[in-house]
Amino acid sequence: MDDTTAGGRTDRPSAVRSGTGKLSRFADLAGVRLYHDNAFAVTGLAVTARGRAVRQHRQRLEARLAVRDHLPPDPDSPLAGWRRREEVRAAFEEFQDPRRRLVDELLWRWGEPGHGCGCPASVHEEHDDAVRLHAMVLEAEAGRITTAPDARDTLWRGAAAGWGPLLERPELRHHLAHRIGELDDPRLGGLTADDFLTELPGLLVSPFRDLAADPGFRPRLAGVCASWAQYAAFADPFAALFEETVEETVQEITDGLRTANAKKEAGLFGDAERILRREVLPAFDRIGELRAFVPNWRYEDVSHVVAVGVGNLAVAMLGHHQYTPPTREQKETVVDLAEKAYEIAPEAHVRAFKENWDVIYEWSTGYGLPAPARPFPWKKVGIGAGVVACVVSVAGYFFGPAVAIGLLVALLYMATAG
């Protein structure tokens, strides 16, 4: 049976009616406004409201909105802020399609079990606690309520501890199956409780994608996500959630390294360093903040490429200063880049980077300012055949064969000069 509004059915196109998917409401709600845009949260209706109750409530709110642009917040709601007229009217449209309203039901307060529900009271209590904590922390992260970071982290853990076990309870499936039967709408034909519950974990963690883009939240991201990822229901959604973010960041690193290399080849070492420090290294740090959700092989590949790019700049600057005495600041820059490359390098390659850093550090302290009559002892630089091959292959991958061949010639010259 259809739930119509006071003004009758409208023909507002929705994602469901346009054929983009039977459960498109999951995509519509995904993100940090997961609860804030919930139709029940916006309208103040109970999740069991139907037909006449929906129409009468809409008429009351329309009368209020005729004389004011906003509705005050519900004092019993975990959400804050006034609701605009447009938000309220759009929310009522969601009651027209039971496939969409059921998603909103899953994400709002159920209250006491009703007649025929058959749920233990504890299931409704656990569900409503999970909704409340999750909604509160998203409001806090959005700045709509004021809480300290430690308190927000506690809310995150509470929301995870609420939703994680609840998703494993068969009573949740039974409740949703009951609601499908209660709505008794032909558009729900062929849909089961599992169709909704399969999509729910991904929707619940979807705010983390938006939050990962917030520099203020990123230092807390791994710790907060870990409290969710410990539950089996969220393991796969987390991997999928951050896959695109990781790939975008890797591309940013690749583009930055390519630009820095071009500056280095042109002898613009200051420009190359700035690109590494302002673009490449911050992007690599963002990968590190998602470390728990990045495959080991992927993280090591990215680490190696970044370490090579940073180390190559240090070696190039060192070669430049063989006959051009560096300032103290320039020496410190070369040493710092070599050390950074050593710190970033994956375990399989760390020894070669450590040897290079040791030699560069020795140069900065022992050799002082090398004079033309005393060329730098390239043979001491710890670049073995394996590292040469690796560096050349990476250069060929990112910058093309011409650069790779040029780099190989330069390395062979360095290894044999003097």
Image: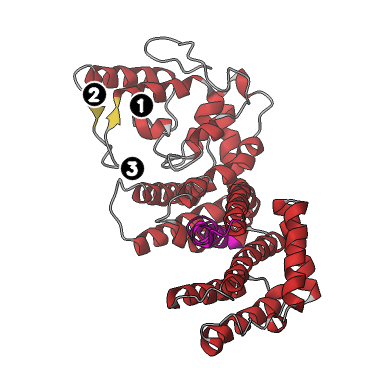
Report the front residue among 52 and 117: 52
The mark that comes first in sequence, 2 or 1, is 2
Q: Which residue is mark 3?
A: 79
Q: Secondary structure at mark 2?
A: loop
Report the front residue among 5 and 240.
240
Residue at 63% from the left image edge and 81% from the top image edge: 376
- Magenta-tinted stretch: 266-291
Tag 3 secondary structure: loop
The answer to whether one can see residue 193 in this image is yes
Residue annotated with mark 1: 87
Identify the residue position indicated by label 2 in the image: 69
Question: What percent of the width, then of the height, locates residue 182?
Answer: 55, 27
Q: Which residue type does callout 3 highlight?
A: Leu
The residue lying furthest to the left in this view is: 67
* Quarter occupied by the C terminus: bottom right
Q: Secondary structure at mark 1?
A: helix
Labels 2 and 1 touching (C-beta < 8 A): no
Q: Is residue 168 visible?
A: no
Q: As rendered, which of 259 and 197 lies closer to the eye? A: 259
